[in-house]
Image: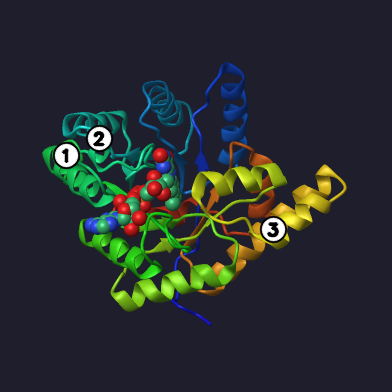
Amino acid sequence: MSIATSVAPPSLSYELYPPASRDASESVFSTIAALESTDPDYVSVTYSGSPTRRAASLELIDHLIRDTRLRPLAHLTCVGESRESLQNLVRHFISLGVRGVLALRGDLPTKTDEWRGEFPFARYLIELIREVEAEHSAALAGGRLGVGVAAYPIRHPESPSFDHDIEVLLAKERSGANYAITQVYFQAIEYTNLVESAQRAGVTIPIIPGVIPLNSLKRLNRLASMTGVCPDPELAHALETADSEAERHRIGVAAAVNLARRAFDDGAPGVHLYTFNDHRGSLDVVEQLELPRTRAKVTRTWATRAVA
Ligand code: FAD
């Protein structure tokens, strides 16, 4: 079944975590160098509201801009943040040269409504980003920031239903989002359902599948607890019973390649690889997908150049 016809070559992007220590910095730098060779459309940098993690995100973005040919996509979370601090961060991103922001609510450390503050949902952050963008119109030469959002193939843990998630995605598009990246998922049909339901509801922005090559049961379980997405029992069993690291690597890569291929069959406009700062699995996925990688196609990347 084909959901949409993708005319441009698929986009390729990776997600990186800012390093938490000196050793981790060295490992992330070698990952960046390896990923750079595949000429991705952009590399996203995760964000957390804690001051240390925030500084690490900004440093990593600065490194990508100054020392590499990669375009960063800055994640930003809003829950519990003040308007002023969010405005200042978006201004700082613009001054660094960031042209793409992934607008997220962020996870709730507690379930109390009081803690949510002025920005309880990602939609309000998109509106704030558009306001700051307008202020910086001259610096941006009248251009726009590419604003991405999260989408959920499986119901968001706090959401009453999958249909509600689709309404939220539509609301985020109408607030100014240019594209969405999905949460991890393990069954190809879940991406198909998301795209079909979103399109039926009136969503028109590209929805990029987020895929992760997992090479251990420990990582799979950690991911499940971070995202609230149930681990796939078949993948869990295969990883648990594999008798070598090489076999676990092969299983994780094959599962990710299968999900990405099935998403491309559904017309997916690209693939976003969650790397966990380990480039080996992602590089093998890219190699097996045989994505056409040429600099010419980056002119249509939604992530860092808005199409709106
Ligand atoms: P929202 O779209 O605001 O939705 C949050 C919840 O509120 C959902 O249950 C939704 O149904 C509900 N909701 C939204 N609007 C309304 C409304 N008007 N009325 C009622 N209910 C509503 N987290 C980080 O901390 N740092 C990161 O760097 C990060 N990167 C991510 C990257 C990707 C690609 C993805 C998919 C997730 C990422 N996350 C990150 C996790 C994300 O912050 C969480 O999933 C968070 O719980 C929800 O964020 P959101 O932007 O989807 O929120």
Task: Tell me, yes or no, whether the two marked residues, 3 and 2, touch with CB atoms within 8 Å.
Answer: no
Name the one closer to the observer, 138 or 175.
175
Mark 3 and mark 1: span between their CA atoms? 41 Å
Q: Is residue 284 left or right of residue 142?
A: right
Residue 102, given in percent of the width and then of the height, sits at 35, 46
Q: How is the image coloured?
A: rainbow
Q: Residues within 10 Å of mark 3 (few under 14, many from 20)?
A: some
Sequence-first disc among 3 and 2 = 2
Check disc 1 and report the residue beneath it: 132
Q: Secondary structure at mark 1?
A: helix
Q: Residue furthest top?
A: 22
Tag in front: 3 or 2: 2
Q: Residue 198: horizontal and vertical position, in percent? A: 36, 71
Q: Nearer the viewer, residue 206 or 153?
A: 153
Marks 3 and 1 close (CB-CB < 8 Å): no
Give the answer, above or below, for where 198 lies relative to 17: below
Q: Is residue 3 left or right of residue 255?
A: left
Classify residue 220 as left or right of residue 176: right
Can residue 278 be seen at all in this image of the molecule?
yes
Q: Amino acid at mark 2?
A: Val
Q: CA distance from mark 1 to mark 2?
A: 7 Å
The residue closer to the viewer here, 225 or 105, is 225
Question: Label 2 crowding class (10 Å Cα cut-off): few <14, some 14-19, many 20+?
Answer: many
Q: Nearer the viewer, mark 3 or mark 1?
A: 1
> Between 93 and 48, which is closer to the camera in this rendering?
48
Q: Residue at x 47, y 26 (%)?
A: 67
Residue in the image at 49% along x and 31% along y: 68
* Residue with the mark numbered 3: 288
Q: Looking at the rendered structure, which numbered label has been put on residue 90?
A: 2
Q: Is mark 2 within 8 Å of ligand 1?
A: no
